[in-house]
Image: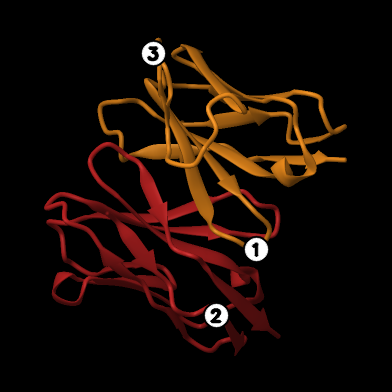
Amino acid sequence: AQKVTQAQTEISVVEKEDVTLDCVYETRDTTYYLFWYKQPPSGELVFLIRRNSFDEQNEISGRYSWNFQKSTSSFNFTITASQVVDSAVYFCALSGVWGKLQFGSGTQVVVTP
Amino acid sequence: GAVVSQHPSRVICKSGTSVKIECRSLDFQATTMFWYRQFPKKSLMLMATSNEGSKATYEQGVEKDKFLINHASLTLSTLTVTSAHPEDSSFYICSASSGTSPYEQYFGPGTRLTVT
């Protein structure tokens, strides 16, 4: 069975601080995909990144960066120099090759000015 | 590209009535569509997977007769909540994939259902 754990329920930061969201996963599949989504108050899911199990390269996209470590089954997400617009719930998710997503419980990020 | 729409965005219905939610892929053919449910301040839970032209596959604990899913064309899947009750109130989100890469799925904006 697949499982995704986001231990942080809520993180509050002041604008311009960095924030790191933890994600730990469990799967027996050798081929799998990891995702991060942002869900603002409107409810719509915003896709941020997808990583496959064979690509452990870290990735940076603007203020966002991701650290994938198979050795610890983790796929952590860092927002650098946070902004108020980053306030949202962030979900880590895992799927096998057939696309059924298992979501973590989400981390609420609150950025105050 | 890869746009998925849902209709309606919000619906309020009375207990005992049925509600239909549509999920459309606007610019690609979706061989597979997924339906998720999200309770307030909770995570998304997969309800079912539907493949065009075949019966949906429901996750354990999801009532097939309560949540009817139809995927009659490559661009449309519908979820009908039958005999809705207040506990069915939730945020329902669909996603669609083209089938060549099922893990590459695109989410609709969601439908907020309130049953009074």
- For mark 3, name the chain: B
Residue A82, numbered label: 2
Query: Residue A34, position in %: x, y?
Result: 30, 57
| Image quadrant in which you'd find residue A69 | bottom left
Kind of residue at disc 3: Ser
Q: Identify residue for label 1.
A: B41
Count of residue discs:
3
Question: Residue B21 at x, y = what percent?
Answer: 66, 26
Give coordinates of residue A4: x percent, y percent: 36, 64
Crowding around mark 1 (Cα neighbors within 10 Å: few <14, some 14 to 19, many 20+) is: few
Q: Around disc 3, counting alpha carbons within 10 Å, would you say few (fewer than 14), some (14 to 19), or many (20 or more)?
A: few
Q: Quadrant of residue B55?
A: top left
Q: Do the residues labelled 1 and 2 touch (CB within 8 Å)?
A: no
Give above or below for B33 relative to A39. Answer: above
Amino acid tagged 2: Ser
The kind of secondary structure element at disc 3 is: loop
Residue at which label 3 appears: B54
Q: Colour of chain A?
A: red
- Judged from the image, the secondary structure of the residue bearing numbered disc 2 is loop
The chain to which mark 2 is attached is: A
| Residue at screen point 58% across, 76% down | A109
Q: Which mark is residue B61?
A: none
